Amino acid sequence: MDFIQLTGIRSYGYTGYLQEEQVLGQWFEVDLTLWLDLSHPGQSDNIEDTLDYRRAIEIVKHLVKTSKFALVEKLASTIAEAILKLDKVQQVQVRLSKPAAPIPDFEGKITLEITRSNLQSGELH
């Protein structure tokens, strides 16, 4: 199965378990892998035959900016659900990172990855 990857989508949001995360906010980074059939647009060279990935980027930025969840797992799941509603997307992988998580003496980033599908198991190749 074909896919499109969108990486490095950065947006400021207010999801987090700590109260200050929901008040002060923080940066989030999102990478998407979108599985869809690219054979027809590969022949037609017509944008109407493929996914206009600008829409996927808009959805991610909007959800990060406007959501106030306690858990990044909920934010990632909400992003996946919204992306799966886009025409032609059969499966999505959401990789969501908090590059500056408010954890004392921790300079790394927190990343989670989920995969959701509109298809029955076994239909993707």
Image (spheres, grey):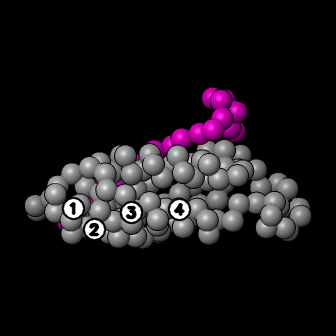
Q: Dots 2 and 4: beta carbons under 8 Å? A: no
Residue positioned 39% across, 66% down in the render: 65
- Estimate the spatial distance between the alpha carbons at disc 2 and disc 4, rounded to whole Å: 18 Å
Q: What amino acid is found at the position of numbered circle 2 in the picture?
A: Gln
Left or right: 113, with 58 as reference point:
left
Foreground label between 1 and 3: 3
Foreground label between 2 and 4: 4
> Is disc 3 placed on a helix, strand or loop?
helix
Give the residue at mark 4.
59
- With respect to residue 74, does 42 lie above or below? below
Left or right: 17, with 98 as reference point:
left
- With respect to residue 18, does 120 lie above or below? above
Q: What amino acid is found at the position of numbered circle 3 in the picture?
A: Thr
Label whose residue precedes the other's in the sequence (4 or 3): 4
Q: Is residue 106 visible?
A: no
Which mark, residue 77?
none
Q: Dots 1 and 3: beta carbons under 8 Å? A: no
Residue positioned 16% across, 63% down in the render: 20
Q: Dots 4 and 3: beta carbons under 8 Å? A: no
Which mark, residue 66?
3
> Is disc 4 placed on a helix, strand or loop?
helix
Give the magenta-colored segment's residue range.
106-125
Q: Dots 2 and 1: beta carbons under 8 Å? A: yes
Q: What amino acid is found at the position of numbered circle 1 in the picture?
A: Glu
